[in-house]
Amino acid sequence: MINDTHVHPIADNRTIYPRIRDLENKAGLRTVHDLGQPEWPAFALTEMLETMDACGITKATLVQAYYTYHHDNSYVIDLTAAHPERFVAVCVLDELDPATADHLTDLVQNHRVRGWRIMGNKPKGFFTDPRTFPLWKRAQSLNIPICLGSRYTEIPDLMEPLKRETQVPIAIEHTWGMKIETPFKDYGKHLLDLAQLPHVHLKIAAPISFSLREAGLSAKEVYGTLIDAFGVDRLMWGSNYPANWHKHGKVAERVQMMRDDLAFLTKEEQDKILGRNALNVWPDLK
């Protein structure tokens, strides 16, 4: 059993599901959500289901593609509604909007949203800004995981809210923005500091696998260090597709790369990371 904890659906119909670039271009505005990223290819429902079946992926967590749709979560919500037996959705919201907490309640209670994603690259002081506290509290009252797409350098700023909000799982998304250097145990210190918090889980994905290869490190050194700190039960695999599709390959290649990287573990440990551990964070996938 494989559960993909991090896949980004991208609609092929840009009329029904316009991308933020489409809207800005139509309005004659400069595209502000590009951030230097190439536009992602479509990864729509039919291709997604065919890919999952071909790769042995049972279920998936659909993570809102912020740089494609910004705060419009319509596509992940619609796909989850169409196939609740296979998907749950993770939304991206405007944390500083006073109305957002009630909006999150509606998404969870009426649209099968089972997670809130905080994007990274926030301004200094964002994670200790009292205006964000109600949304953290609401996520806890709704009993949904909080996913953090934070930059590696933001981890120290995250410690305050992570120590304050301990009642729901926290998923650190593929240590986004982390370029692994040698020695990993020193470079990864901030990440390893999170291991002291038992509600914090790690998503591991293609960016780490490629980064460790670029740094000339072994998978055992990197993933072994993470497992020594967090334990094997707090690591989960996610494809992160179609992000970096031009560098990291298709989903099947990412599954195989993860299997190769985890080959030093027992089959039971590999099965946990590739599938079973996700159920501890998203029980709706059972």
Image (cartoon, rainbow, N blue to C red):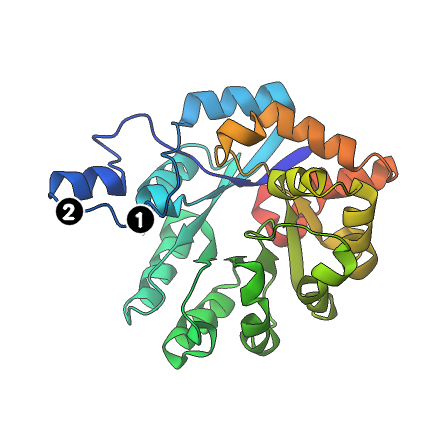
Measuring 61% from the left and 76% from the top, which residue is drawn there? 163
Left or right: where 32 falls relative to 276: left
Number of marks in the rendered image: 2
Residue, disc 1: 33
> Which disc, if any, is residue 105?
none
Q: Quadrant of residue 190?
A: bottom right
Dot 1 falls on a residue whose secondary structure is: loop
Residue farthest toward the bottom in the current orientation of the protein:
130
Q: Residue 198 location in percent, x, y?
A: 71, 67
Q: Residue at x 31, y 52 (%)?
A: 71
Quarter of the image that includes the N terminus: top right
Residue 56 lies, in percent from the top left, at 65, 24
- The quarter holding residue 52 reads top right
Q: Are marks 1 and 2 in contact (CB under 8 Å)?
A: no
Along the line of sight, the residue nearer the viewer: 38 or 5: 38
Q: Tell me residue 228's x, y (percent).
A: 83, 57
Q: Which mark is residue 29?
A: 2
Residue 219 is drawn in which quadrant? top right
Query: What residue type is disc 1 on?
Result: His
Q: Look at the image and tell me in which quarter the C terminus lies.
A: top right
Residue name at image x 86 percent, y 40 percent? 265
The three-letter code of the residue at mark 2 reads Leu
What is the distance, in whole Å, between disc 1 and disc 2 at their CAs? 11 Å
- Residues 199 and 244: in front is 244
Q: Is residue 271 above or below residue 250?
A: below
Q: Secondary structure at mark 2?
A: loop
* Left or right: where 239 falls relative to 266: left
Whether residue 146 is visible here, answered yes or no, is no
